[in-house]
Amino acid sequence: MHSRNHRSDQEQKHIVSSENADAGAAESGTAAAGSTGPDGGPAMVWDVVVVGAGPAGASAAYAAAVAGRRVLLLEKAELPRYKTCGGGIIGPSRDALPPGFELPLQDRVKAVTFSLDGRFTRTRRSRRMLFGLINRPEFDAQLVEHAQKAGAELRTGATVSRVEQHGPAVPDRRTVAVVLADGETVLARAVVGADGSAGRIGAHVGVKLGQVDLGLEAEIPVPASVAEDWRGRVLIDWGPLPGSYGWVFPKGDTLTVGVISARGEGAATKRYLEDFVARLGLAGFEPAISSGHLTRCRTDDSPLSRGRVLVCGDAAGLLEPWTREGISFALRSGRLAGEWAVRVAEAGDAVDARRQALNYAFAIKAGLGVEMAVGRRMLALFERRPGLLHATITGFRPAWNAFADITRGAATLGGLVRGNGFARRAIDLLDRRMDTASGVGPAGRGVSRKDGTPEPEAEAADVAGVAGAPEAPDVTAAAGATDVVAVPDAADSVVVTDAVVAKDVVAEPDDVKLADAAEGAPDRRPADGGQGPEGA
């Protein structure tokens, strides 16, 4: 447990001492009248308090500190700490990083192998890097260091019990009280919640969560020869469960192997991971870490603020619904939350604070909200017709180019659909072929046929129904084929590969026990939810 009266020498290099902070507060008039601090003196009021030191929280703290405000960053764990996360850094993530941030990349991806539940394996290669891979402990810690260098103060081992905007703990209407588990009260002009999808701050704001998915992951150390086979290449497998997929991300001498599917299918998801690992020939290697994580997407009408409290990242339910990618959403929403929290802190009354909070919500919905809406439509398509998606992305050059542009940050999913006539027509066509009045959950999950029977495997020729689209290869017609040749483009080559041959399969992987516990997890956070993991 980190004590507020004791910090390590390393932390002292970056953290403003409480004595200096108190002095600054007195000079700037930010001591709360009528309130007392732990030492009996006037209680200091921070401009911005950020709860949660993942990518969203660190980005918010950095943005507020760079603006010259006095920022306190609270984190319940000690840093660095492990997070269940694939660790892919796509272009939008890279572009949202602080200036001068050097990514601690474990690998640079230039090739993607796609498979359809282990079949029809194809590899696409690019001459340029598509995206990078990082380990979350180092990445998160580095983000926090940048926030500290900008002037934010970090306190670890600080678990938030509740947030109050009215009552005896709040000295005036411009102040928010953050009550810690040890009874201490921290005061702020504005609070940013980045404490995960099951956190206290989201519960206070009233965040509503619709789509809930279960991700299971194993960090598997492998010999140098195996690591070399995977260097610069990732695998994405469209899975056997509706909306599910698996991944292999190489990070030096370790492979991050995981799967994700809708919550409520814990046993089937666990079997998918076990089968996936065995099929890759990795079952004989002992995972260093086996973990699980629930990802949760906000509903369209979910609030992003309450009074002087804003939420961002996982705490706000902000992530891409189809891929469940969360790091870029965390970084971008965190930066916006930090910037608008500064304005909320400066607001002289509740009306002005509300205006600034609404501006933050508008900024989120105009950018990330649009991407989430398109992601929901893509998820609905993917749940119904994974074969069509696989055929299109591996055999249709514009689709692969779009994938590459999105991962590099040259385009966004939302911008692509809005600005590309073919993409827009394709999505509209597929929407019309789906029964969108049946089987759509609160987050817009996939659909089912009216008679309840599963939809037959899609034919890639559906793509040709869109005006101007050439016919893509039909993977369903290649039932007995190992390889299906796709057409290369001038910039990128297409390499056809066989399915990975299993070798050295000695034992099944360790059980991921969280999968069983997650079966009983609620779809929505409890009213007094606990601080959950942040970032994905």
Image (cartoon, rainbow, N blue to C red):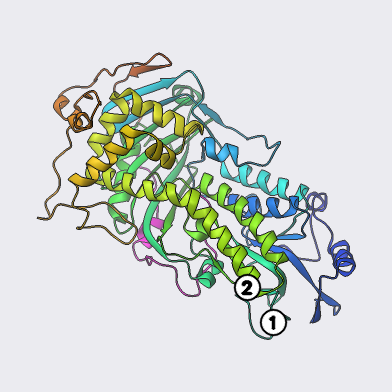
356 left or right of 120?
right
State whether residue 104 is above or below residue 205: above
Q: Residue at x 75, y 52 (%)?
A: 67
The circle on residue 169 is 1
Question: Residue 510 location, x and y as percent?
Answer: 39, 47
Q: Secondary structure at mark 2?
A: helix
The circle on residue 251 is none
Within 10 angstroms of label 1, few (less than 14), some, or many (20 or more) residues? some
The N terminus lies in quadrant = bottom right
Queried whether the magenta region covers residue 509, the answer comes back as: yes
Queried whether the magenta region covers residue 166, the answer comes back as: no
377 left or right of 142?
left
Residue extent of the magenta highlight = 507-536
Question: Residue 292 location, x and y as percent?
Answer: 43, 52
Asked if one can make out residue 182 in the rendered structure from this viewpoint, the answer is yes
The circle on residue 351 is 2
Question: Residue 204 location, x and y as percent?
Answer: 54, 72
